[in-house]
């Protein structure tokens, strides 16, 4: 499979024609142990939002960022219906270290859209939405999507 020089990922994953727009969030991700994936899907399908006491051990700013990112992810999923995928990456993971070096991320959180750095902070949903719509419009996919609010 061919590797693109600009994104250093498989081209079929990052081509706007081949799949969803990828929004990558690089930051500190709390490590949480949870129920098995099947049980979590059942809990989410019923509208339950599982809360973990494990979060209590993290500093307030990390918890706040975690909940803000969760809210942004839910809004992205609801509004863009699979045309946009949020990819959270822990900055301490091997992938996070690689992205930090590659994109010269000196401070987290940071947001990449299609492999390009757009924000050096966690943006509001409206700021992120505006950039996503602009990228979709430039790629020619805004016309093929349903009307956005």
Image: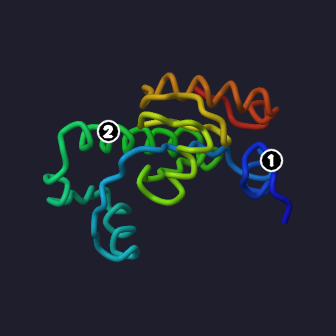
Left or right of 67 on screen, residue 128? right
Residue 63's tag is none
**Dot label at residue 5:** 1
Give the x, y percent position of residue 90. 43, 53
Q: Secondary structure at mark 1?
A: loop
Of helix, strand and loop, which one carries label 2?
helix
Neighbor class of circle 1 (other Cα within 10 Å; few <14, some 14-19, many 20+) is few
Of residues 104 and 12, the one nearer the viewer is: 104
The image quadrant that residue 38 belongs to is bottom left
In front: mark 1 or mark 2?
1
Q: Which residue is mark 2?
A: 65
Image coordinates for residue 23, horizontal then vertical, percent:
58, 42
Where in the figure is residue 101, as x and y percent of width and height? 57, 44
Residue 140, how many percent across, how many down? 82, 32
Q: Residue 117 appears in which quarter of the rendering?
A: top right
- Closer to the camera in the image, 23 or 107: 107
Q: Is residue 69 left or right of residue 132?
A: left
**Quick one: 2 or 127, which is closer to the camera?**
2
Name the quadrant of the N terminus: bottom right
Q: Earlier in the sequence, mark 1 or mark 2?
A: 1
Q: CA distance from mark 1 to mark 2?
A: 31 Å
Disc 2 crowd rating (10 Å Cα; few below 14, some 14-19, many 20+) is some
Residue at horizontal 42%, vertical 37%? 109
Answer whether labels 1 and 2 touch (C-beta < 8 Å). Answer: no
């Amino acid at each position: 499979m061919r590797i693109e020089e600009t994104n250093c990922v498989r081209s079929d994953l990052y081509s706007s024609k081949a799949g969803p727009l990828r929004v990558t969030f690089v930051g500190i991700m709390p490590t949480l142990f949870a129920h098995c994936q099947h049980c979590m899907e059942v809990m989410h399908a019923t509208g339950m939002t599982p809360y973990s006491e494990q979060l209590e051990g993290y500093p307030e700013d990390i918890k706040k960022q975690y909940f803000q990112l969760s809210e942004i992810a839910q809004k992205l999923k609801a509004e863009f219906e699979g045309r946009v995928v949020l990819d959270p990456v822990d900055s301490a993971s091997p992938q996070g270290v690689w992205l930090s070096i590659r994109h010269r991320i000196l401070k987290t959180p940071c947001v990449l859209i299609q492999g390009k750095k757009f924000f050096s902070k966690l943006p509001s949903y409206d700021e992120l939405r505006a950039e996503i719509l602009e990228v979709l419009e430039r790629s020619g996919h805004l016309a093929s999507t349903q009307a956005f609010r």
